[in-house]
Image (cartoon, rainbow, N blue to C red):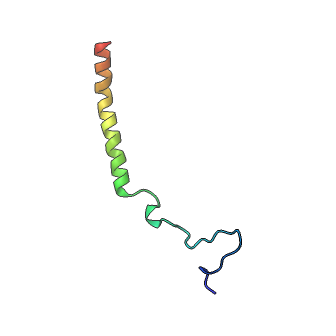
Amino acid sequence: MDVENVRERGGVVALQDHPYPEQQGFSTEDILWAVGIWSVILTLTPAIAFYLLMIA
């Protein structure tokens, strides 16, 4: 009897431990994207603060 063919009444059949193995953790692209976004935010923050102080 195969594991795939065994079905218990009311039970959940798990065929894999990780249904999306390629989506586990962070990829290099995710980390570079996050670093890029934070660098833009941190670079523009002083300019925005200076602008707000000048128009206040």
From the viewer's perspective, is 15 left or right of 43?
right
In the picture shown, does residue 35 fall above or below 14? above
From the viewer's perspective, is 31 left or right of 8?
left
In the picture shown, does residue 37 fall above or below 9? above
> Which of 24 and 5 lies nearest the eye of the viewer?
5
Q: Residue furthest top?
A: 56
> Which of 52 and 2 lies nearest the eye of the viewer?
2
From the viewer's perspective, is 44 left or right of 3?
left
Q: Residue furthest bottom?
A: 1
Looking at the image, which residue is at 47% across and 61% down? 24
In the picture shown, does residue 5 fall above or below 43? below
Residue 18 at what x, y percent from top left? 53, 67
From the viewer's perspective, is 29 left or right of 24?
left
Q: Residue furthest front?
A: 9
Name the quadrant of the C terminus. Answer: top left
Residue 37 at what x, y percent from top left? 33, 42
Looking at the image, which residue is at 33% across and 34% down? 42
Name the quadrant of the N terminus. Answer: bottom right
Looking at the image, which residue is at 46% across and 58% down? 25
Exactly how many numbered labels are in the figure? 0
> Which of 23 and 27 lies nearest the eye of the viewer?
23
Q: Quadrant of residue 38?
A: top left
Looking at the image, which residue is at 33% across and 50% down? 32
Residue 49 at what x, y percent from top left? 33, 22
In the picture shown, does residue 4 fall above or below 32? below
